[in-house]
Each structure stands twice: as C-alpha cells, then as structure tokens.
Image (cartoon, grey):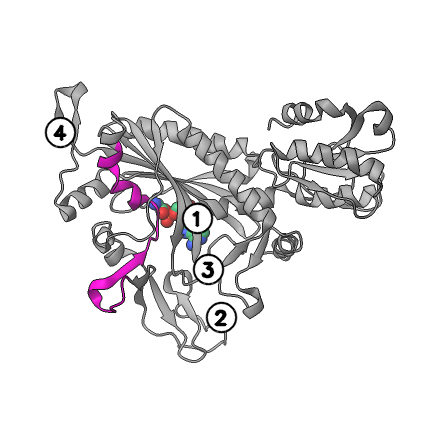
Amino acid sequence: MSEENLKSMADLVAHSKHRGFIFQSSEIYGGLGSCWDMGPLGVELKNNLKQSWWKAMTYRDDIDGVDAAILMHPTVWKASGHVDNFTDPLVDCKVCKSRFRADNIDLNAPCSNCGSKDSFTEPRNFNLMFSTQMGPVEDTSSKVYLRPETAQGIFVNFPNVQTTMRRKLPFGIAQIGKAFRNEITPGNFIFRTREFEQMEMQYFIKPGTQAEAMEMWKELRWNWHLENGLRKERLQWKKHEQLAHYADAAFDIEYQFAHGWGEMEGIHSRTDFDLKQHQEYSKKNLNYVDQLDGNKKYLPYVLETSVGCDRCMLAIMSDAYRTEFPGDAEKERVVMRFKPSLAPIKAAIMPLMKKPDLEGPATALLRDLQKDFKCEYDTAGSIGKRYRRQDEIGTPACITVDFDTLTDHSVTVRDRDTMVQERVALDKVKSYIKEKFSL
Ligand code: GAP
C-alpha cells in the first residue's frame, strides 16, 4: 500500500472509532484478531445497507427471503465440498513461527517477518471452517461447523420455499446472515475478517438460460452499488478466467479500496452443482417439475449474487469519507457524504441556546421526527461546531431552532453537502426532509 493510501486507511479506521462507527472487538482485553464490533453509528449504517439490499432483492415478484440457522447438519459441508476443498495452502516460518498463505508469497524469498532464509515448512492444506461441538459430549459425531457462507442454507431450503410459496422457475431465495472463516491472512480493517455478514441470493433457473440470467443480474447488481452512491470510477468488473469446478461463468464487482482493487461482490453461474450434491448426499429428490414444459423433471441451475455486507460497508465509508475546504473557510471539514437513506442519523435538532424557550419547540420537533427517523439532539458548543460534528458522521440535515422560531414558527434547515440554509415552517419540516433527501 502506498504511503498516501496507508494514511487514508489509518484515517478512516481512526475516524470510525472516534465517531462511534466501528470498534475493535474485546478492545479492553487487547482486542481479538480481525474481529470488529459495530458501534452505535456503524450498526445504523449497516442496517440501512442491509435494508437497501433486502428491498432491492426481495421487494419483487420473483424472490423470497429466508433466515437459516448458522449451524447446519455436518453433511451439508461434505456435500458442498467445504470439508474437502475449502482450504488454503499454509506455510510456517520455522524461526519466528509466522504463518503465511503459500500462494501469496515467494517461498524462495526470506521470511518477510524475521528475514530468515530457507525457513518455510512444506505447504499444507488448512481448512478455513471453524468447528465446534453440539451437545455435551465431545466426540467426532457431535462436530458441527459455523457456516462459511450463507448460500448452503438457501440450497437446502430450495424444496421448502418452492413448494410453500408455489414458485415456478425462475425464482430466487435471498438471505442476509453471519458467516465465519478462519482466514490465514485477514486484515485491511473490515475487508477480510474471520466473522462477517453476507447478503446472498440464489436465482433458480431453467438449464440453458444461465447466460441471460447472468446479464440481468450483472446489470442489476452493478446499478445497486451506483444507486448507493459509490463512485463509478472506483468500480470495475473482473471476469474469472479460471473457474471453480462448479461454475460455468463468474464475474466479480471490484471496488478500489485504499489497499487496492478488491472483490466486493461475486456473480457466479453455479450450474446444478449444489442441488445435485445435496440430492446425492441427502438421498432426497430435489427435482423441479416443469409444468410449462411437459412436466419435465430436472434440477434447476443457479445464478448466485453474493456480496459481503461489511466489505460493502467499507466501500461505502471509504467513498463517503472526504476532507474538504468549503468556500473561503480556512479550516478543513471532514464530511461523510453518505447517500441520505444510508446515513446513520438523518437529522440533528439543535436549539440555538440551552434555554427552555428554545428547548421546548426543539424537543417537540425531535419527538415528532423520531417517529420516522433516527435523530440526534445536540446542544453542546457553538452552532458551527455542531454542524462540523454532524458533517463528520454524515447527517444530511441540521435543524436549528432559534429565537425567530418563537414568532415565525419556522426553523433553519442546513444541507450537509451544499451547506445552504433554508427557512422551513415547523409543521412542514418532516415532509421537507422526506422529499429533499428521498427518505
Ligand atoms: N457463496 C459464495 C461465496 O461465499 P465468496 O467469494 O467466498 O463466495 C462472497 O464470498 C463475498 O463475501 C465476497 O465477495 C466478499 O464480499 C465477502 N467475503 C468473503 N470472505 C470474507 C471475509 N473473510 N471477510 C469479509 N468479507 C468476506
């Protein structure tokens, strides 16, 4: 990473902590490697992002949602190939005991940690799944895994959803949930962590229609990222030249993170691999009966869209985080230019002074706006300082109640991005904000 990019990542990490977006997990105990906690603003931002995905993916005619258990029957992971193939090649430095992914380093070069030469062990495969025990007796038969992807909870529910919702192909199943991977080289803040959330959708289609489904989903998913405010020049497609054994086409949407271009979302044509495997291992018939094609029975093909929620959140935060010198101001302002619907706090209500005359109408307005939006009530410091504080967390509207309010029943609404202030009647503030910021 270049000096400048290192600084911008370090700035974002510091800002995230300072402003209550993201904290190191178990910080008072020294932290836990590559695990992060969402703070009060982080959880709002993440919930808004999940809501944006959920709406885009399930508020349609052809997709249902599920929320499957994290713990699944262990044979699921045998059938999916994760027990045998979900591995990374790992080497240790015999001198300093550092661990590396063998495919990420030059095994003939000295150890990058201690400089020792010829110190690496032979590469060995390391399974990335976390395992635990179910029930009080610890033996091999009670071993279960923390799911490494949410997709399998969808595949095994294919017959349940198809029959209960009386679905005909093509249709999809969407899910948001936690996934766990014992990554060897996690890092870059919340880009690669050991516990993360995925937003995945499996679109079940008639075999032979995968190219057209791929085109449709590539376009929809690309546009979703743009609609969430990501800058187009920081997005690119990557076509997989080497395909996984189950895929017949695969594309990634990459984002230009501070540490470089990285995968944010995968759009993969997975054939009938997963359903075929689950049919074989479960011995249950998973065939679809195509009433529109002479009651033909077959296993549907699957077009998958899979985006990491935390990784997407990192892109949203990196994109929104700006340092600006507004107008002739000498002091820089830090501003998170979130799309308003994603912003953790939608409006900050500020009585000009801490006086009962002003606090009365200000709290009345707060109570009314809180019925619809997450708001903050801020009385500390000068108005200028309060604006800056709200800019730093990306609040689209700052509303000041001043002495004129007592006579004209209006307030000043200041726009985060333009910093333009408008006078708005108290009883119109809610509709004004809703309309202006499309909330
Ligand atoms: N079901 C397909 C699947 O899981 P993947 O490429 O392994 O595919 C999908 O993961 C997405 O999940 C990635 O594009 C990335 O956004 C996110 N992801 C994967 N591993 C992650 C990790 N260790 N930390 C954070 N996000 C991760």
Residue 197 disc label: 1
Mark 2 vs mark 3, CA separation in Å: 16 Å
Tell which of 66 and 316 is nearer to you.
66
Secondary structure of residue under mark 4 = strand
In percent of width and height, residue 37 lies at: 53, 56
Q: Which quadrant holds residue 340?
A: top right
Amino acid under disc 2: Ser
Residue 186 disc label: 3
* Count of number-bearing discs: 4
Residue at (24%, 42%) from the top-left corner?
Answer: 156
Mark 3 vs mark 1, CA separation in Å: 15 Å
Residue 243 in view of the camera: no
Mark 4 vs mark 1, CA separation in Å: 35 Å
Dot 3 alpha-carbon crowd within 10 angstroms: few under 14, some 14 to 19, many 20 or more: some
Do the residues under discs 3 and 4 have CB atoms within 8 angstroms? no
Q: Is residue 34 magenta?
A: no
In percent of width and height, residue 430 lies at: 67, 26
Residue 187 disc label: none
Mark 3 vs mark 4, CA separation in Å: 44 Å
In this rendering, the label closer to the viewer, 4 or 2: 4
Residue under numbered circle 4: 297
